[in-house]
Structure formats: structure tokens, C-alpha cells
Amino acid sequence: MTINNLLKNGISTGMKYIFPLLGTWILWILTCWIPYLNVGTTIALCTLPAMMSRGETISPTEIFNSKYRHNMGNFFLLIGFMFTGLLFGFVFLIIPGLVLMYSWYIAILLLVDKNLNPMQALHESNAKTNGHKWTIFLSLLFVGIGYAVINFLLNLIGASGGNATMILIFSIINLIVYIIYSCIGMGIQSEIYKQLVGGNSEN
């Protein structure tokens, strides 16, 4: 697994799924106010990269699949364990927290996609990412820096226009860039999952 590989394949995968992902996000926004259902749709959003890693077709309505709601208890436990671990890690002068962040980068995917319990998912994610944390970190950093630079330039140009129309136009462009950035981020995560885990879903 190399930075070049992750960026190349991650960008390609992210752009391939841009419209299904956009439809999924819109459906999530429209239904995120519905109690209980919103838990399942949120879990689904977090685990879509597993499907992307296998090249599966994603339908926006996939987020309403009941299998995601069935993972609610384990999902909340996993988030709780991760939050607590990261909190202590960052208290110990930040670096341990960053290491844990990338050690557990695919834990949620493993929890749902491989039917692991929270502790198994954390352990497996830590084992799979061992020796690859720098590659993951730098890949995401390069994409993040690229987005930050583009975002800064768009805001600068939009603000210098001095009128509401220009600001609106560049705000729309900024939103499109953010959507592309988010898709690429999920594409990179799917490529990481594919290279470190691979295989088929256990569901």
C-alpha cells in the first residue's frame, strides 16, 4: 500500500460513486430528524466505503436497510470506546491520540461489514493498520491540504468580487468542491479497506 496508490485509486473510486453518494447524503439530510431511523441511516453512511471497496452498486435507499439499525447497540459501544480511548490518547500530549485515530480507522467498517463486536473491531483494525499508519495519514493529509488551498482561493476570489451574486456563485462552487472532497475521502477509505481487509461482506 503506497500513498500514490491510495490517492490514485481513492480519487477514481470516489468520483465513480459521486452521484450515488450525493443521493444518499440528500436522503440522510431529509430523514435525519426521524428518531431510530436516523441511527440506521447514519451507520449506513459510515460503512458505505466497505461496499465501494468491492465495486458494488450503491442505491441511495440502501441507508434504510434494517441491517444497519440492528447494529445500533454495538455501534454506540464502539463509538464510546473510540471516544474514550482517543480522549486519553490526546491527553497524553496528542501523539498517542493521533496514533489511535489511524489505528482504529477502519473499525466501524469491520464492525458492520464483518459482523465483529466492538472490541474485535478495534483489535482487528489496529492489527490491519499496523505498519500502514503513516501512509494513511499522509494520503489523507495531502487531500486535506489540497481541499484547504482550493477552499481558501475560492473564498478569497468570491469575497474580492464585492457583490452578493459573486459570493453566491463562489459559495455554490465551494459546495461542489466540498462534495467532491468528501467523495474522494470515502474513496480513499474504501481503497484502504480493500487493501487491508478485502474479501466479501459477512452479512
Image: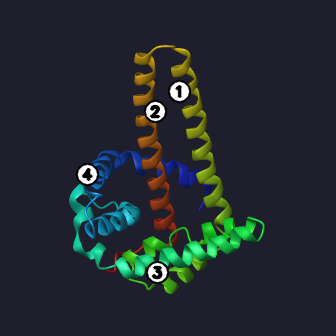
Kind of residue sitting beneath label 4: Leu
Residue 69, quarter of the rendered image: bottom left
What SS does tag 1 mark?
Answer: helix
Q: Nearer the viewer, mark 4 or mark 1?
A: 4
Q: Of the two numbered discs 4 and 3 on the same chain, state the one appearing first in sequence.
A: 4
What SS does tag 3 mark?
Answer: helix
Kind of residue sitting beneath label 2: Asn
- Residue 200 coordinates in the image, percent (x, y): 35, 75
Q: Which residue is mark 1?
A: 154
Q: Which residue is mark 2?
A: 174
Q: CA distance from mark 3 to mark 1?
A: 40 Å
Q: Nearer the viewer, mark 2 or mark 3?
A: 3
- Looking at the rendered structure, the number of numbered marks drawn on it comes to 4
What SS does tag 2 mark?
Answer: helix
Q: CA distance from mark 2 to mark 3?
A: 35 Å
Q: Quadrant of the N terminus?
A: bottom right
Q: CA distance from mark 4 to mark 1?
A: 28 Å
Q: CA distance from mark 4 to mark 3?
A: 26 Å
Q: Of the two numbered discs 1 and 2 on the same chain, state the one appearing first in sequence.
A: 1
Q: Which residue is mark 3?
A: 77
- Tell me whether the residue at label 1 lies in contact with that at label 2, contact meaning CB atoms closer than 8 angstroms: yes
Q: CA distance from mark 1 to mark 2?
A: 7 Å
User: Which disc, if any, is residue 30?
Assistant: 4
Q: Of the two numbered discs 2 and 3 on the same chain, state the one appearing first in sequence.
A: 3
What SS does tag 4 mark?
Answer: helix
